[in-house]
Amino acid sequence: MAKYLILGGNGIFGVHLAMYLLRKVPDAQVLCVGRNPEKSGAFSLHRGIDDRRYQYHQIHMVFEDDRLMELLEKAQPDYIVNFAALAADVASSWKYATRFYETNTVALARIADRLIGKPWLKRWLQIGSSEIYGSVAVPSTEDTPISPSSPYAVSKAAGDMHLKAIHRVRGFPMNIVWPSNAYGSGQQLYRIIPRTILACLLGRKIPLQGGGKAVKSYIHAQDLAEAIHLTLHKASAGACYNIGPERGTAIRDLVAMICDKLGKPFDSVVDMAPDRLGQDAQYVLNSSKIRRELGWKDSIDLSHGLDECIDWAKKHLDELRPLSTEVFFQA
């Protein structure tokens, strides 16, 4: 019986991983850890699948690391997947840079160092950020030199480098994956996909920063969950992988796709706005390594993934209607 512990398990992609494991791995025991009370309603997609194999623990990994270590020593999970990170929108990292370093670098190092040599830990899988590569002219490979262009990206890159160091020198059993922009049902409402959907459904408008010219690639949360599971069970310790589709999409085109699906004129939904500080013009990943070595492939294309997100928003519209779609920064 495999035991998985998900740090940042109250975030939407931790929820999607829990959902994947409970559905796809019949003997999986899933423990989620998050800093806030467990989400409910529209944001608790994993609940009800098999709650007997699931637990949630509210622990703040920055300020309650001793409590977290007590849980880890008691539970002794085979696999730890770390989604926990201070992200908000990247622009916030310019205003609160030290808070990003405290969570994404210092707290990560503190916990990982205390896990070195634990005989029960088979693998730590770190969810990195593709923003470490900065703006690129061609899809980044795992060997592309990093060029982070925001304090958020720097904090994530520094955490990755620490994990690589303790793996190389002290044998810490870790992997790192760098996903492209993940999305899916239940995503934070300030993100571009749910924010655009709700604007269309509720007759609102959204600011389109820089005219939406930035090009990014988008991976569905369930495709990401599958890549994580494959990495945990098939990858060699120390291996690192990009995860994403083969093509990028301009944000303007993404918003236009959603408007078209919901029958709304593009100009009725968007207001042009200045580009955000440190916005990368393009980041698209070359994920041929994980496709070749682990046999991963993305199975949910962007159009079908957007349809799923739209269906989710329509189903829960009464619950979502009064909620803010503005960025809320919480350290």
Image (cartoon, grey):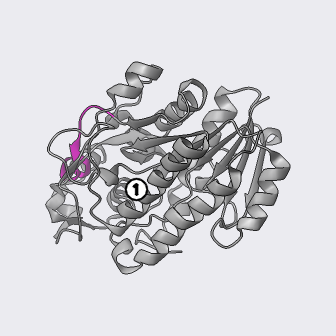
Q: Which residue is mark 1?
A: 157
> Percent x, y for residue 145?
26, 47
Q: Nearer the viewer, residue 259 or 232?
A: 232
Task: Tell me where residue 12 appears, x and y as whole percent.
Answer: 54, 52
In the visual, does 47 lie left or right of 213?
A: right
Residue sitting nearer the eye, 202 or 98? 98
Q: Please state the horizontal and vertical placement of residue 277, each as a whole percent of the image.
A: 23, 71
Q: Is residue 99 above or below residue 59?
A: below
Q: Is residue 248 visible?
A: yes
**Left or right placement of residue 306 versus residue 124 in this view:** left
Q: Residue at x 25, y 54 (%)?
A: 134
201 in magenta: no
In front: 152, or 223? Answer: 152
Decide: is 37 above or below 290. below
Kindly state the secondary structure of the residue where label 1 is placed.
helix
Name the quadrant of the N terminus. top right
In the rendered structure, the answer to whether residue 294 lies left or right of residue 130 reads right
Magenta region, residue range: 245-255
Q: Quadrant of residue 220?
A: top left
Residue type beneath disc 1: Ala
